[in-house]
Amino acid sequence: MKNFPVIRIWEGCDPTVAEAIRQFQDRWRPYSGASRGKRIDRLIQELIDPAVARYAASLPQQYLSYMPGAGGVVTLSDIVRLVGLNSMARLQRQLLRAFVSTQAEETARDQRFVATLETLLDLIRACARKPPLKAKVRDTRLNGRRAQEFCRLCGAPAELTAFAVGNDNTKRDDPGDVLRLSSVYCTDHRPQLPNGDWNPAYRKAKRSLAQFDMELARLTKQSGNWKKVEAQSGDPLVDSYIYHFIRKHHLRPGDEAELRDHARRMADGKLSDRKKQMVMLERYGVSQSDAARRLGVERQAVSKALAALPSEFRQLPNLLGFPAYFLVSTKEAN
Ligand SMILES: [Zn+2]
């Protein structure tokens, strides 16, 4: 199973679907989206369609429209054939988000439903990434090691992973084939350039590795719950910043590449916790002088920091309906 993506079965997933995916993973080695004889949609049809149908039969009608292939007429494998794996994953992602944002309260059945949707989305994403078995030349170059899926420093695939799934872009600056492909870093973050110099993007990203890891952990934690503040940063303003950031971008725990990219952009954009606090106070309508007093800095420092902040970090959705206790704790601290 070397170099193949792993399909993640989310905790709480429907057991029938989970078992079908385990069997799928045992058997999918010769199958792929690109292969003619062993088309992966056939394996989906054989193993996943019946499991989805069984689970769907246990659900009330209003759930079915969020789960592609659950309606009983068109199956999951039918839709994959109609629109392809990548569009299928986009569709599943949108429906999952729609379900999560419309549910007023979370019942045990909702939780199982969400975990099952996450699992099925991961299945389709893994199918889309899976390389065809016939790429023998590439497989030997990988030398039997399991390629790491993501770059250590961002959300892009590591060079070796990208190459293994057929992306020749990894060699775009290296026509002479001087460099060994990295199993740890993506093309943008590889330590050395083809001319032997250190790569400045690598050095820059490496310096902010601790912040990257910290932001990624917070974002991941918060992405599992859109209704409660979860980041546990130790500061309520930072927590609420992460909460709004996740809601703005509609991120779920399965969006690993996106979560990693956001964490990298936060680190590269020097979005410190102090700046997050400033943005939140601004969003609550606190004046810059009051914000400066609360944070123990000069007013000019607040206005300068906010003005220099890229708009992607300063613009958050409006705060209507946000738990008022954050406002209270802001006042109490004064
Ligand atoms: Zn990278």
Image (cartoon, rainbow, N blue to C red):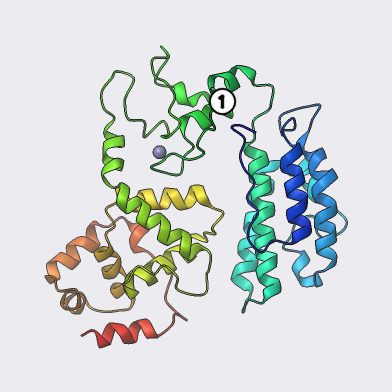
Q: Position of residue 31 (x, y in %)?
A: 75, 32
Q: Position of residue 244 (x, y in %)?
A: 43, 68
Residue located farthest toward the top when viewing the structure as drawn: 176
Q: Position of residue 321 (x, y in %)?
A: 47, 81
Question: Within the image, what quadrant is residue 68 found in?
Answer: bottom right
Above/below status of 272 relative to 26 = below
Is 255 left or right of 303, judged from the image as shown? right
Residue shown at the point (11%, 70%) measured from the top left = 298
Above/below status of 213 relative to 80 = below
Q: Nearer the viewer, residue 332 or 89?
A: 332
Kindly identify the amino acid type of the residue bearing the numbered disc 1: Gly
| Residue 259 visible (yes or no) | yes
Residue shown at the point (76%, 37%) measured from the top left = 27
Pointer 1: residues within 10 angstroms few (<14), some, or many (20+)? few
Question: Within the image, what quadrant is residue 314 found in?
Answer: bottom left
Q: Report the quarter where the C terminus lies.
A: bottom left
Above/below status of 34 relative to 272 = above
The residue to which callout 1 is attached is 144
| Residue 78 visible (yes or no) | no
Is 86 left or right of 208, judged from the image as shown? right
Q: Report the quarter where the N terminus lies.
A: top right
Residue shown at the point (76%, 53%) measured from the top left = 19
Residue shown at the point (54%, 19%) measured from the top left = 141
Residue at mark 1: C-beta within 8 A of ligand 1: no
Q: Position of residue 268 (x, y in %)?
A: 30, 48
The quadrant of the picture showing ligand 1 is top left
Q: Secondary structure at mark 1?
A: loop
Question: Within the image, what quadrant is residue 243 found in?
Answer: bottom left
Is 287 left or right of 144, judged from the image as shown? left
| Count of marks overlaid on the render | 1
